[in-house]
Amino acid sequence: QKEVEQDPGPLSVPEGAIVSLNCTYSNSAFQYFMWYRQYSRKGPELLMYTYSSGNKEDGRFTAQVDKSSKYISLFIRDSQPSDSATYLCATSRERGYSTLTFGKGTMLLVSP
Amino acid sequence: KAGVTQTPRYLIKTRGQQVTLSCSPISGHRSVSWYQQTPGQGLQFLFEYFSETQRNKGNFPGRFSGRQFSNSRSEMNVSTLELGDSALYLCASSDSGGTQETQYFGPGTRLLVL
């Protein structure tokens, strides 16, 4: 079993929809949780960064971590065509990025 | 401030050849990390250099190597290329804090091995 599992999609939604992206992980030692956005022909950019369980909100984006079920979610409200990208979840045991474990990414397509 | 730059952006090689990829970090950043991204394995950490020294290493064979120069620019080398080395190679730079929050990725070099 891969340490971080993520549905590859694509996930297609109309503009304005609420989007839910999810990952599961297997290693209970993971404490740091991240979501990255990667546009076509670009490198990933960090969207959300959370430590341990709980919610974190930033504008239209909300990251949610449930350590008891080893489940990570990213919610996007009022989705826009510019949100069309691949979203990667990542986890690590410590703050350093050498231990980052990434999901394979979910492609999101938001149609106008 | 200019972002992380990588050259070349695209590269085609044949099996058995070697390749060198280059990365220029954000000005002032002393840490450079390299990642391999493939559809099958996703994004995987290769190694990190800080002040010209390899600080961390992922689980890749010795054919993958790198170095960092005094100006923080970094190169990655892959020798005896295999078909499975076809991937997007990403470089990321960070300040000395070395945390996920301070890491910025470049656009990558897409390598195709024939």
Image (tube, coloured by chain):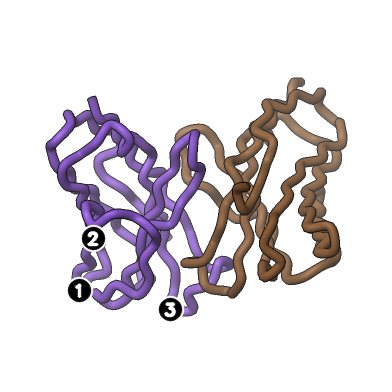
Q: Is residue A43 left or right of residue A46?
A: left
Q: Is residue B26 visible?
A: no
Q: Is residue B90 visible?
A: yes
Query: Residue B56 in the image: x percent, y percent?
Result: 38, 71
* Element at label 3: loop
Q: Quadrant of residue A107?
A: top right
Query: Which one is earlier in the sequence, the residue at label 3 or at label 1?
Result: 1
Q: Colour of chain A?
A: brown
| Badge 3 amino acid | Ser
The residue closer to the viewer here, B110 or A67, is A67
Q: How many marks?
A: 3
Q: Chain of mark 1?
A: B
Tell me what residue is drawn at x 68 percent, y 29 percent.
Answer: A9
Q: Chain of mark 3?
A: B
* Element at label 2: strand
**Within-10-Å neighbours for mark 2: few <14, some 14–19, many 20+:** many
Q: Which residue is mark 2?
A: B66
Q: Residue furthest front?
A: A1
**Within-10-Å neighbours for mark 1: few <14, some 14–19, many 20+:** few
Q: Chain of mark 2?
A: B
Q: Are marks 2 and 3 in contact (CB under 8 Å)?
A: no
Query: In the image, which lettered chain appears purple?
Result: B
Instruction: State which quarter of the image contains the C terminus of chain B.
Output: top left
Q: Which residue is mark 3?
A: B96
* Element at label 1: loop
C-alpha span from label 1 to label 2: 14 Å
Query: Residue B106 in the image: x percent, y percent?
Result: 41, 50
Instruction: State which quarter of the image contains the N terminus of chain B.
Output: bottom left
Q: Which residue is mark 1?
A: B70
Query: Which one is earlier in the sequence, the residue at label 2 or at label 3?
Result: 2
Are the residues flagged by discs 3 and 1 from a single subunit?
Answer: yes
